Amino acid sequence: MVEIRDLILDFYEKKAPNKTMFMFGDVYKGVKKLCVKEKIDPPYKLRAVKKVVDKMVIDAELDYWSSGSTTYIKLAKPLEEIRPSTNLEDKLD
């Protein structure tokens, strides 16, 4: 089963070239779309995604950034550091 954390990272990986910070609602909508694509039924609930985002912030994988009126969520470090490559060649080195 696909974990919420992996779906969040997939969302950031897909959007990374264009945009780096998102409001929580955008992250949740992206996770819901990925749930449909991965055929996860029913999709994860908002509260479950929020708990995983909070855990990822505590683990220094994501970071909150505030403009004063709006809070955004961004990657705390490069995606390659958060999700190491799983290529067989990388494992052999």
Image: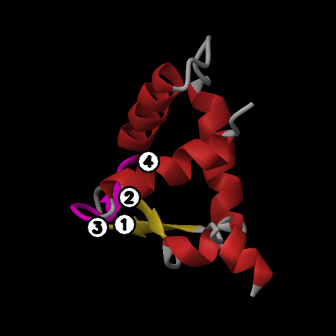
Cα separation between marks 3 and 1: 4 Å
**Chain part drawn in magenta:** 17-23
Cα separation between marks 4 and 2: 15 Å
Assess disc 4: are there few (<14), some (14-19) or many (≥20) residues with their C-alpha within 10 Å of its C-alpha. Answer: some
Cα separation between marks 1 and 2: 6 Å
Disc 3 marks which amino acid?
Ser
| Residue hosting label 3 | 67
Q: Main secondary structure of the magenta part?
A: loop
Disc 2 marks which amino acid?
Tyr
Residue positioned 49% across, 77% down in the render: 78
Residue positioned 56% across, 28% down in the render: 46
Query: Do the residues under discs 3 and 1 have CB atoms within 8 angstroms?
Result: yes
- Counting residues from the start of the chain, the first of labels 3 and 2 encountered is 3
| Residue hosting label 1 | 66
Up-down relation of residue 30 to residue 78 (above or below): above
Q: Where does the C terminus fall, quadrant-wise?
A: bottom right
Query: Do the residues under discs 3 and 2 have CB atoms within 8 angstroms?
Result: yes
Q: Nearer the viewer, residue 66 or 87?
A: 87
| Residue hosting label 2 | 72
Residue positioned 68% across, 76% down in the render: 89
Q: Is residue 45 left or right of residue 3?
A: left
| Residue hosting label 4 | 11
- Counting residues from the start of the chain, the first of labels 1 and 4 encountered is 4
- Counting residues from the start of the chain, the first of labels 4 and 2 encountered is 4
Q: Is residue 56 left or right of residue 77?
A: right
Image x and y of residue 72, in percent: 38, 58
Q: Nearer the viewer, mark 1 or mark 4?
A: 4
- Counting residues from the start of the chain, the first of labels 1 and 2 encountered is 1
